[in-house]
Image (cartoon, coloured by chain):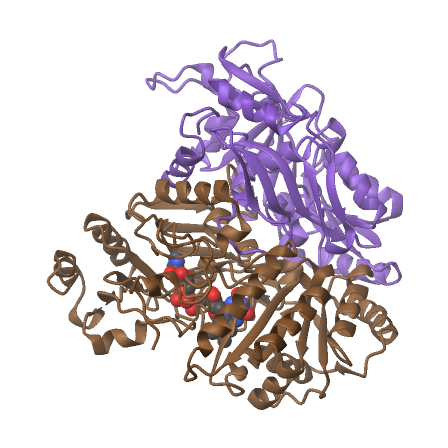
């Protein structure tokens, strides 16, 4: 595609070091954190300002070439996977915090700003940005917006969407629109809310206004070990029924505990299940609630209970939990993370079934999950060098997703549908819903250029049941290496 | 309308469709309709479909009254933390979503947009479509529930809604403080909203002698007194001069907020307009209102929302040209937007624009809402223009 007129047009917009077309240059962009999928784009552009992004999109539209916005490429669902012969717009250099207004408690940021940087910048004012994905030290706000990313602390204050007040967006033909504003309230349909979580299909967020919250006065974190996942799950039910509203409720199983140990030397007790509950808020309120919480937990017969007394101890508890994902990489050469949601009261059933599936496939599954809102993160371990291992791991992953849908849940709580789960979206929604989404997408993006092939199944060829090789793989569009 | 099929038929057959719930926001639902428009009354499409206290979720038909839901949740010690307003006037869940209304409690955990997790709606082609889900966390597919918050019945007819709920704090306390001037009030507001105190609500309003602030906290009863004292300290430690500080608890406290939810302060015969803004915009807003005695008002959500009582043109006798009553122009000048919920505000004809005073029927005031994103979405969901256009 090097002779394509679009490349010519782009080369007039970008200096050579910001327009990458050589295979060696493109390699770093060929996949995201779902590394089983790889795809070579026609070019990667590295804009330095908003005008360059808009012009790039406009040119893509003019030449009918699809594009993918890219933040840090940490998507776990293939969301930032390039499109064959398409353009990747790498937004990392749009990384300025444009305004931090402590009085209004907002931050206006460019899309390439790293999540954690927002809280760091807000800290001197006693404020922070609440959504805390485990990847927060590398992922971008643009990526968070596209996926409505969550984190351990979303139980009380919600996901990315609950913290985005306004946005400037380039629609897929380059038209720039303002959505929302700076107020917590708005007039008319909640357009920022509709854009968040649209996985890049509605265009590129150029500027995002985030709500900041006062840093809680204190945290109280408890870690309890149980002799089974079921017992830990019962403890969650007891906490939820008590009327306490913790900032986070997390569970890890034995394999995840092992990973956290290997990866982060967390010093966790060795047990079949660990529960982490954290309360946050004013000192006196948290003290009182913590007493209630401890009493509840004692009644659930834990094997061992540890309380974080200091900020250091708290950090250690969370370090293990947040490292669990990447640490699983130490237990097996490859893994797939799933992200299904089940109604909280069905957690026990879901885990028992995952256990059964794991045994019947002979594949290890480590479980780390946001128990408070029923968001599972089964980590399916395999060795990609083994013939057929990936396919079997994917098949198992698919069964887990179907299980979540059957239990009345969702196929994704925070990682997005992306490339990976698009065949499963029609299992969650009927043909009318799929059509409505496609209609809206077409109306916003008449040529389906923005992140084509993600979230929504494309064309007839892709069957609605996907087991085994990915439909695009069968079509020879993508490869695994 | 008692079932969805009836709504679907009506949408398919009518040339235009207008929707109405409990009629508590008549400026949105009881406007004069075009002759060829069919009015759908949704108050009969009601009832709770499912309530699962341990899941923190319930599903109900769109015409279910907010009051009924409040009572149901209270029995399980749960609530909708965003204080849905106008329940006493008969507000329905669907109408509250379509009007995008959250009350004072929105400050703490988010607004109606953050608690609505699933919907069913009839689109412009008469199809019933599901959006979102019934679990509290879900990132799959486009977020139709959020799109329908504030949609004013113009994108489709909501038929069923699923909400997330929260456990209600066992007790609340409210600190009230009086200030002599707006700037004193605003500095106290700044101090209290930037403190680490977990405020459930912060409202304020002008009084005859100055301003009153209400700050609400909630939690376990035995530490509430101590926390309220800390709150009082923060409120009075700001740069502003506090005149009088009081603490409310129990029934008296609850009735303060009950009155806020039902807009008791709104004088008989006045219209009601909802105006989002930020604390920094308040001085300009107050200057524009110019200490106006004709405007009763209450600022809510920590200064992010103004509920404005404004003379209702549809009932007022005076036909005289009084440009100070033109709220639309006032908001335009401040680059703000408003939605008329009750009554009708004056909207002077814009000279030379060819737009006559019929525009006074439009509940959307101030800066136009139009944008390409919304236009394209509406074209997909309602290709034949059955619902009102934006
Ligand atoms: C170790 C690890 C832990 C993780 N933990 C969590 C977690 O706890 N919670 C969670 O929710 N996720 C988690 N993730 C997933 C991932 O980090 C998030 O999805 C994150 O939001 C992606 O950000 P990114 O900058 O890497 O985006 P990318 O991967 O580069 O892009 C993600 C998607 O966003 C789109 N996009 C990027 N920028 C824009 C923009 N400006 N406008 C429009 N679309 C855009 C892309 O096209 C793509 O579809 C984790 C990932 C890893 C690797």
Q: Is residue A21 left or right of residue B193?
A: left
- Residue B335: x and y in percent read 44, 37
A332 shown above or below B386: below
Residue at image coords 55%, 14%? B32
Q: Colour in which chain A is shown? A: brown
- Residue B40: x and y in percent read 60, 21
Ligand 1 image-quadrant field: bottom left
- Res A342 → quadrant: bottom right
Q: Name the quadrant of the N terminus of chain A.
A: bottom left
Q: Name the quadrant of the C terminus of chain A.
A: bottom left
Is residue A388 something one can see in this rendering? yes
Q: Is residue A69 left or right of residue B236?
A: left
Q: How many marks?
A: 0
B143 shown above or below A33: above
- Residue A164: x and y in percent read 51, 54
Q: Colour in which chain B is shown? A: purple
Residue at image coords 42%, 38%? B377
- Res B157 → quadrant: top right
Q: Is residue A58 left or right of residue B333?
A: left
Is residue B323 something one can see in this rendering? no
Q: Could you say which is closer to the camera, residue A33 or residue B230?
A: A33
Residue at image coords 70%, 28%? B266
- Residue A366: x and y in percent read 60, 78
- Res A437 → quadrant: top left
A445 shown above or below A308: above
Q: Could you say which is closer to the camera, residue B69 or residue B300?
A: B69
Residue at image coords 76%, 73%? A232
């Amino acid at each position: 595609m090097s002779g394509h007129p679009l490349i010519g047009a782009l080369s007039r917009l970008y200096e050579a070091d910001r327009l990458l077309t050589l295979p060696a240059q493109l390699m770093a962009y060929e996949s995201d954190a779902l590394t089983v999928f790889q795809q070579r784009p026609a070019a990667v552009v590295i804009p330095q300002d908003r005008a360059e992004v808009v012009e790039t999109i406009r040119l893509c539209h003019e030449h009918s070439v699809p594009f993918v916005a890219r933040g840090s490429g940490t998507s776990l669902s293939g969301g930032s996977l390039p499109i064959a012969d398409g353009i990747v717009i790498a937004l990392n250099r749009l990384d300025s915090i444009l305004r931090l207004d402590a009085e209004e408690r907002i931050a206006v940021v460019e899309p390439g700003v790293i999540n954690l940087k927002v809280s760091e910048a807000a800290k001197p004012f006693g404020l922070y940005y609440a959504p805390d994905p485990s990847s927060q030290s590398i992922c971008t706000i643009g990526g968070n917006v596209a996926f409505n990313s969550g984190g351990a602390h979303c139980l009380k204050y919600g996901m990315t969407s609950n913290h985005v007040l306004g946005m400037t967006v380039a629609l897929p033909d380059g038209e720039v629109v303002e959505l929302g504003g700076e107020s917590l309230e708005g007039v008319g349909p909640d357009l920022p809310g509709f854009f968040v979580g649209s996985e890049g299909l509605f265009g590129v967020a150029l500027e995002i206004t985030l709500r900041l919250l006062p840093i809680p006065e204190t945290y109280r974190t408890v870690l309890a070990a149980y002799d089974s996942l079921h017992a830990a799950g019962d403890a969650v039910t007891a906490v939820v029924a008590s009327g306490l509203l913790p900032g986070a409720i997390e569970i890890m199983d034995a394999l995840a505990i092992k990973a956290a140990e290997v990866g982060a030397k967390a010093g966790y007790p060795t047990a079949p299940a660990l529960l982490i509950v954290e309360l946050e808020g004013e000192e006196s309120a948290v003290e009182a609630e913590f007493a209630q919480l401890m009493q509840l937990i004692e009644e659930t017969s834990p094997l061992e209970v540890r309380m974080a007394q200091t900020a250091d101890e708290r950090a250690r508890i969370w370090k293990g939990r947040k490292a669990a994902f990447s640490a699983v990489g130490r237990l097996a050469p490859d893994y797939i993370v799933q992200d299904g949601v089940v109604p909280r009261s069905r957690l026990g059933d879901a885990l028992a079934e995952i256990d059964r599936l794991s045994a019947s496939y002979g594949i290890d599954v480590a479980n780390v999950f946001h128990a408070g809102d029923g968001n599972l993160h089964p980590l399916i371990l395999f060795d990609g060098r083994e013939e057929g291992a990936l396919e079997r791991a994917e098949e198992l992953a698919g069964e887990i997703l179907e299980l979540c849908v059957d239990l009345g849940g969702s196929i994704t709580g925070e990682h997005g549908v992306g490339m990976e789960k698009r065949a499963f979206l029609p299992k969650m929604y009927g043909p009318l819903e799929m059509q409505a989404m496609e209609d809206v997408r077409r109306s916003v993006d008449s040529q389906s250029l923005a992140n084509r092939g993600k979230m929504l199944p494309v064309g007839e060829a892709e069957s609605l049941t996907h087991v085994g090789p990915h439909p695009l793989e069968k079509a020879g569009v993508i490869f695994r290496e | 309308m008692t079932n969805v099929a009836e709504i679907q038929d009506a949408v398919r057959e009518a040339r235009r469709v207008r929707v109405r719930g409990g009629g508590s926001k008549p400026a949105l639902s009881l406007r004069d309709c075009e002759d060829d428009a069919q009015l759908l009354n949704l108050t009969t499409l009601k009832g709770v479909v499912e309530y699962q206290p341990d899941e923190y979720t319930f599903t109900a038909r769109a015409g279910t009254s907010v009051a009924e839901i409040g009572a149901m949740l209270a029995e399980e010690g749960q609530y909708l933390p965003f204080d849905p307003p106008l329940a006493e006037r008969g507000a329905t869940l669907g109408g509250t979503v379509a009007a995008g209304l959250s009350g004072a409690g929105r400050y703490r955990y988010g607004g109606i947009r953050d608690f609505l997790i699933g919907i069913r709606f009839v689109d412009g082609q008469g199809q019933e479509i599901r959006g979102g889900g019934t679990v509290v966390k879900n990132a799959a597919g486009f977020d139709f529930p959020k799109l329908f918050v504030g949609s004013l019945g113009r994108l489709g007819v909501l038929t069923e809604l699923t909400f997330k709920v929260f456990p209600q704090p066992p007790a609340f306390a409210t600190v009230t403080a009086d200030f002599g001037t707006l700037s004193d009030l605003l500095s106290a507001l700044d101090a209290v909203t930037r403190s680490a105190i977990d405020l459930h609500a912060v409202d304020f309003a002008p009084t005859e002698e100055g301003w009153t602030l209400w700050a609400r906290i909630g939690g376990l009863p035995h530490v509430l007194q101590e926390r309220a004292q800390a709150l009082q300290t923060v409120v009075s430690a700001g740069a502003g001069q506090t005149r009088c500080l009081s603490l409310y608890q129990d029934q008296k406290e609850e009735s303060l907020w009950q009155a806020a939810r039902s807009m008791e302060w709104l004088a008989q015969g006045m219209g009601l307009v909802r105006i989002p803004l930020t604390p920094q915009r308040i001085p300009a807003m107050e200057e524009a209102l110019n200490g106006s005695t004709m405007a009763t008002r209450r600022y809510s959500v920590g200064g992010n929302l103004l509920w404005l009582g404004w003379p209702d043109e549809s009932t007022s006798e005076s036909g005289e040209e009084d440009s100070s009553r033109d709220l639309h122009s006032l908001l335009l000048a401040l680059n703000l937007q408003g939605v008329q919920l009750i009554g009708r505000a004056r909207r002077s004809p814009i000279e030379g624009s060819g737009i006559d005073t019929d525009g006074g029927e439009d509940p959307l005031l101030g800066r136009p809402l139009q944008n390409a994103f919304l236009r394209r979405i509406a074209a997909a969901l309602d290709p034949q223009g059955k619902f009102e256009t934006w």
